[in-house]
């Protein structure tokens, strides 16, 4: 077992502690072949019942444009607002849709299955960051609208949790400054 000091200097601790989101990314993106081992590792998430109640969808190229069109169809936007909304999925060369794909289970409730899907997304964002890619989890009010559901081919047992926007680290990016938290505020005793 690692001491607290050793744990604080471990590779995993450093990767988690230094992760950051990038609101802007370069046009580079990992290939499907590069993604597959990361997805396999993210699948190690805590998953009560080993149901694997999630799936991921790659959106590249014109799939991102179709998502923008679904955003516009789901909103009341017109004119320049519609153009801005349609362009949102184009901010990264790769979007990975995170879908909670709930399985029938008398032991594992829907919220536990959703938590496993969210865990996959978070682990994947950490793995992407560790592999040198930028990743930002984006959601918003249009995630669960009809046109967006249809575009993603969601079943009745599925909910879209959002997208990881993935790309390369921009050359002009500055080192991120993460505000530290006071862990005493978040770690209580029962």
Image (tube, rainbow, N blue to C red):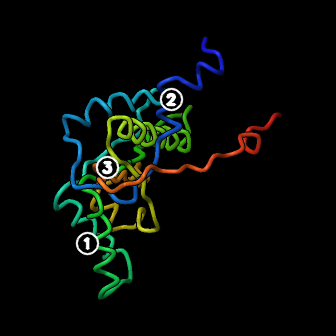
Asked if residue 160 can be seen in this view, the reply is: no
Q: Is residue 9 left or right of residue 80?
A: right
Q: Does residue 125 appear left or right of residue 12 in this picture?
A: left
Q: How many tags in the picture?
A: 3
Q: Earlier in the sequence, mark 3 or mark 1?
A: 1
Q: State the residue in front, 135 or 121.
A: 135
Dot 1 corresponds to which residue?
A: 69
Residue at the disc numbered 2: 46
Question: In the rendered image of this protein, does residue 100 appear above or below residue 49?
Answer: below
Image quadrant in which the N terminus is located: top right
Q: At x 28% / y 50%, what residue is drawn?
A: 167
Cα distance, mark 3 to mark 2?
A: 29 Å
Above or below 183: residue 28: below
Find residue 84 and report its image quarter: bottom left
Question: Where residue 62 sits: x, y (%)?
Answer: 16, 62
For disc 3, the marked residue is 169
The residue sitting at 42% across, 27% down in the picture is 44
In this view of the protein, which residue sits in the foreground, 67 or 100? 67
Q: Residue furthest bottom?
A: 79
Of residue 176 and residue 86, the one placed in the foreground of this image is 176
Q: Earlier in the sequence, mark 3 or mark 2?
A: 2
């Amino acid at each position: 077992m690692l001491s607290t000091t050793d744990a604080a200097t471990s590779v995993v601790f450093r990767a988690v502690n230094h992760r950051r989101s990038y609101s802007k990314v370069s046009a580079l993106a990992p290939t499907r072949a590069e993604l597959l081992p990361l997805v396999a590792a993210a699948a190690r998430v805590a998953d009560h019942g080993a149901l694997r109640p999630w799936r991921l969808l790659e959106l590249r190229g014109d799939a991102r444009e179709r998502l923008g069109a679904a955003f516009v169809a789901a909103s009341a936007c017109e004119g320049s607002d519609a153009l801005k909304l349609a362009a949102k999925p184009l901010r990264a060369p790769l979007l990975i849709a995170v879908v909670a794909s709930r399985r029938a289970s008398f032991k594992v409730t829907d919220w536990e299955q959703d938590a496993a899907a969210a865990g996959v997304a978070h682990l994947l964002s950490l793995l992407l960051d560790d592999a040198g890619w930028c990743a930002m989890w984006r959601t918003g009010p249009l995630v669960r609208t009809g046109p967006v559901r249809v575009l993603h081919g969601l079943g009745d047992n599925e909910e879209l949790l959002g997208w990881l926007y993935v790309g390369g680290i921009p050359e002009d990016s500055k080192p991120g400054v993460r505000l530290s938290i006071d862990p005493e505020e978040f770690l209580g005793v029962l």
